[in-house]
Structures are given as structure tokens and as C-alpha cells.
Amino acid sequence: MFTFMNPYIKFVNYPQNYNWFLELIMPHYSPFVKTISRDIYKTWSGETLINFKWNKYGKYYYSIIWIGFMFLLGCFTAAATIPQQYINDDIQKQLLIASIILGFIHLSFEIRQIIYDPIKWISDIWNIFDLIAFLLPIYTSIYWLQTNNRNIHLISFSCLFLDIKFLLFFRVFESFGVYFAIIISVGKQVASFLFVLFIIIISFAHTFYILLSPEPNFSFGEYTNNNDPNDPWNLATAYHQVFGNGTVDPNPFMIQPPDENTNMFEDFGTSIFAMYLFLTGDSSALSNWTYKNNPSLVILIVLFSLLIVVYLMNLFIGLLSNAIEKDNNRVSFLIQKAEILAEIELFYLLPHQRRWNEWFPKVIYYYADFDKTRQEIKEMIKEGEWNTDEFSELKQKLLHKLKI
């Protein structure tokens, strides 16, 4: 077992001269908060910083934040999910009021982060997700209490964001956090590709909209007899009478009334959604037309299938695979954990707590196992990262003890 000194001296310390009340609104930052870099956290020194902070105060405050969120999740979920026959109105109102109070408490910390550094806040997708997860239950609860109207759309999305927010709390544990780090880092790398893909889908949606949109004088509520092949009434399911001699009456005796889904290309918004469905393999939006007499439609379908479904989607999968292999996911996880700890320091610890020497010492020491140290140094030598110009005598002694 070896004892090492962390080279980042005074890296976690905050200025000793401060205004207590001003520090609550605009706290000073330490080098640890300001400098969150991959170069730091790919080393043992960076990892020991994270472990020290997490064990000293991080895990306790994180647990308190998690428990506080669980109260919000429990109150709102109970009010929204328990059937009316099993919960009386007074208890339901109390749960909604509790959801509002707890939601505002959590929201206040998000507002402090926005005030502190709005550009950094908005650049982190988790912060935007947190804001929605707190605002939606607050608004839904207030709306429900004031109107006595159980808006199932608001409730559904509120529960969705709260449930996913609960899942995000697991990102502080390495077995889960690595995957969250992959989602964000890989997402950033392929964002430009997704934008190109989105523009191409919009372009095809626009083309299909022009080609397949009906004449403007049709109505869903009134049958129109015309020769427009894109009219929803001409695309709707029709029933014809078959006579005893086997002939079929060309005039239908019954037509199933069409709706907005009969021709999804009568509106540009549903045209985009139809293209998204086609991208996922559902081409039913284009199945109402006969392909033999629509060469333009066939050409567009083939182009979309080859360009988007076959080529670009397989290219996208390949880019994702390369991005995952390229990224050092453990380092990304440590950076993610460092950002969580920085958030706890700045917005959950009181100003005087950030000056406690026990939590924020000038020098940090850590223990390392003999075999792991030997393996790590061998790896550094192999990668050319073992610099003998600095502390050459100490490094020679260490190599001698490790028998390298």
C-alpha cells in the first residue's frame, strides 16, 4: 500500500474573504468548480478528488436531495394516479398543495443556477429537463386546484418527466452513470447529423404534401363527388354491391367516413409525422394510393427508402458505434459526477460550509494498492505519459519499490 499526495494543492479551496448574504446569491467558485476537464479526471489524482468530496459531504447531500424529490414524486403521483373512489377530495387537495410547495423548493435551486451562470445552465440538457420536471407538476397542480379540472394531458406529461427525473438520480452511480454519460457525449457528437436528417425529412414531407394534398374545397363532414385522387372521400373504404351474375356495381352503396388520418398529407404537420412513421417502418400513410398509376409517388418512396431508411440510418448507426468506442466513458462519468458535486457545493452548501478545512483541505492524500499502482505506472510508461523530468528522484525510488 502506498500513500500519495494529490498534486492539485488548494484546488478545492474557496476565498476566505466573502459576504455571507451575497454568497448565497452569487457564490464564489473554487478551481475545482471552474476547471472541470477530461485531462484532470482521466488520472488517479482527479478520481481521488471526486471520491474525497463524495465521501465527505456529497453522498449525504445527494441523498437529502433525492429524498426531497421522492416526496414530490410521491405526492403528485398519488394525487394523479389513485382512483377517485379510493381518495377523498380533501386528501387529494393536500397532496396537490404539497406538490406545489415541494416543486417550488426544487425550482428555487434551478433558478439560483440560472442566475449564477445562465449560459452554462442552458448548455446542460439535464438542467432543462429538471426545469420541465419541476414546472409541469407545479402548473398542473395549480390548474387542477383552481379549475377542479383533471387535465389528463398535463398529468400524463408531468408524471412522465417526474418518473424520468427519478431515473436520472441513478447517474451518480458508475454502473448507471456510464450509460447516461454515453447518451450525452454521443448525442453531442451526432447532433449535426441529426439536424441534416431532420432537414431531409422535412424536405420529403414538403414534397409529399404538394403531391398528395387534396383540393381545398373538400370537407370531412360532407361528401364530395369529384375526380380528385387525393380527396379523403375518394380514399376512404367503400363497399360495393355484387350482383348474382358476378358483376360489381361501380357505385358504392356505403362509404366509411374519412378522418384526418385517411390522408395524412392534407396537413403539413401530419405530413412530417407520416414521414417519421415511414422512417420507423410504418408506410401505411402511403398505402391508400395505387402505385401503378402514380410514378411520381413510386419514385419518391424509392428515393426515401434508399436515401433515408437504408443509407442514412445505417450510417447513423455506424456513427453511433464509432462515437461510443471513441469516448472514454469512465472519464465522462467522472466529469458528470464532478458537475453534480460542483452543483451541491455552490447551491446546497452554506457559505461557511464551503470554508471548512475538513471538507475543503489544502492538500489531499490517498492510498493506492501496490499491484494497481504497478499496473498503472506500466500503462503510463507504455503510453508515453511517464515524465521523468519532474521529480526524477522520487519517481526512480517509486520504480525501484515497484520493481519496474
Image (cartoon, rainbow, N blue to C red):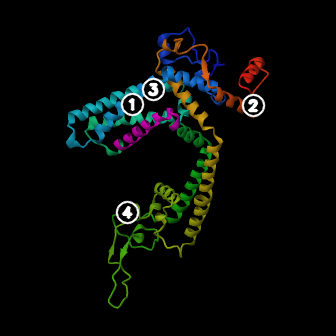
Q: Which residue is mark 3?
A: 62
10 Å crowding of disc 2: few (<14), some (14-19), many (20+): few
Amino acid type, label 4: Asp
10 Å crowding of disc 1: few (<14), some (14-19), many (20+): many
Q: Is residue 171 left or right of residue 248?
A: right
Whether label 3 touches label 1, CB < 8 Å:
no
10 Å crowding of disc 4: few (<14), some (14-19), many (20+): some
Q: CA distance from mark 3 to mark 4?
A: 51 Å
Between circles 2 and 4, the one closer to the viewer is 2
Residue 190: x and y in percent read 61, 45
Residue 295 highlighted magenta (yes or no): no
At 40% across and 33% down in the image, what residue appears?
A: 134
Report the magenta stretch's main SS: helix
* Residue 5 seen in this snapshot: no
Q: Which residue is mark 4?
A: 259
Amino acid type, label 2: Ile
